[in-house]
């Protein structure tokens, strides 16, 4: 490994047609800027159809990455736009970040891990970011999860209420009992709290639900009866025994 560019290309996983062209370390400001460039002598795939297309121009973008030790690290690139005969002029995807994010994928993963342990405000303080930036990462993760979930069958659902803080505030938690994962969290323990979950499922997903284990509060029962076909035969108040 000959220099800083080779080091960062390795730890970032930068591969052709991309390469690290410059690394600037500012010790006084405690930051590192890593410049990445794409080859200009080749075509790039359209982000919609994947067809190789000629370049149109570039747009400068930057992304916050994981810190290098205690130094704030920023990736910078002139991202090509291509001209697709079918979809027009579009900016290509980069392998280190989602199209709509100002953070690298690894940075977003770290933020999401922190959000599993603490509130948005606490994570924002810990990572020296704004509340809106942390919430944006959370919302993008939820969106990706919903897009994946829309392709899946959900058969066994658990609905429960959880209290927190000394004022006995409540949240509604919906679980996929087969895969042991949380599907939905909503404020309070009302009819509307559970409506929000049923509303994001397709008609087929609702029909495919085989059983709903729940706390038998009136709001939960009413919401389930209104949304899940044949719900009266699927509600199991004492948990699933199958």
Image: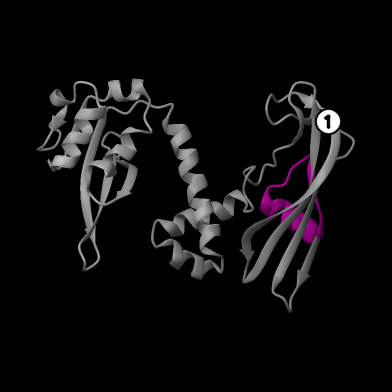
Judged from the image, the secondary structure of the residue bearing numbered disc 1 is loop
What is the x, y in percent for residue 201? 36, 30
- Camera-side residue: 34 or 238? 238
**Picture quadrant where residue 128 is located:** bottom right
Q: Where 192 falls versus 27 (above or below)?
A: above
The structure residue drawn at horizontal position 50% and vertical position 70%, both measured from the top left corner, is 125
What is the x, y in percent for residue 184? 34, 43
Residue that extends furthest to the right in the rendered view of this protein? 41
What is the x, y in percent for residue 237? 11, 37
Q: Image check: 94 left or right of 160?
A: right
- Give the quarter of the figure containing the C terminus: top left
Q: Image check: 28 left or right of 119?
A: right
The structure residue drawn at horizontal position 15% and vertical position 30%, both measured from the top left corner, is 235
- Camera-side residue: 104 or 199? 199
The structure residue drawn at horizontal position 47% and vertical position 53%, both measured from the top left corner, is 112
Residue 17 among magenta residues = yes
Q: Which colour scheme is used?
A: one colour
Residue 224 among magenta residues = no
Mark 1, residue position: 43
Q: Is residue 1 visible?
A: no
The region drawn magenta spans 1-22
């Amino acid at each position: 490994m000959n220099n800083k560019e080779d080091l960062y290309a390795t730890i970032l996983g930068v591969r052709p047609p991309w390469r690290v062209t410059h690394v600037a370390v500012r010790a006084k400001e405690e930051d590192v800027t890593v410049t990445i460039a794409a080859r200009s002598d080749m075509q790039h795939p359209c982000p919609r159809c994947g067809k190789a297309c000629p370049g149109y121009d570039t747009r400068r973008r930057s992304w916050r990455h994981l810190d290098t030790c205690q130094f704030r690290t920023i990736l910078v690139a002139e991202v090509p736009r291509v001209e697709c005969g079918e979809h027009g002029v579009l900016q290509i995807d980069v392998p280190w970040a989602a199209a709509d994010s100002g953070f690298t994928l690894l940075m977003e993963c770290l933020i999401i891990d922190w959000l599993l342990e603490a509130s948005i405000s606490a994570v924002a303080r810990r990572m020296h970011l704004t509340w809106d930036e942390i919430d944006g990462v959370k919302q993008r993760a939820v969106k990706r999860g919903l897009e994946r979930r829309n392709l899946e069958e959900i058969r066994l659902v658990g609905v429960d209420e959880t209290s927190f803080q000394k004022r006995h505030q409540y949240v509604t938690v919906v679980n996929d009992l087969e895969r042991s994962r949380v599907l939905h969290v909503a404020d309070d323990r009302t009819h509307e709290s559970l409506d929000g979950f049923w509303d994001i499922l397709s008609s087929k997903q609702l029909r495919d639900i085989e059983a709903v284990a729940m706390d038998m509060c009136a709001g939960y029962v009413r919401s389930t009866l209104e949304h899940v076909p044949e719900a009266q035969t699927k509600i199991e108040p004492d948990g699933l025994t199958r």
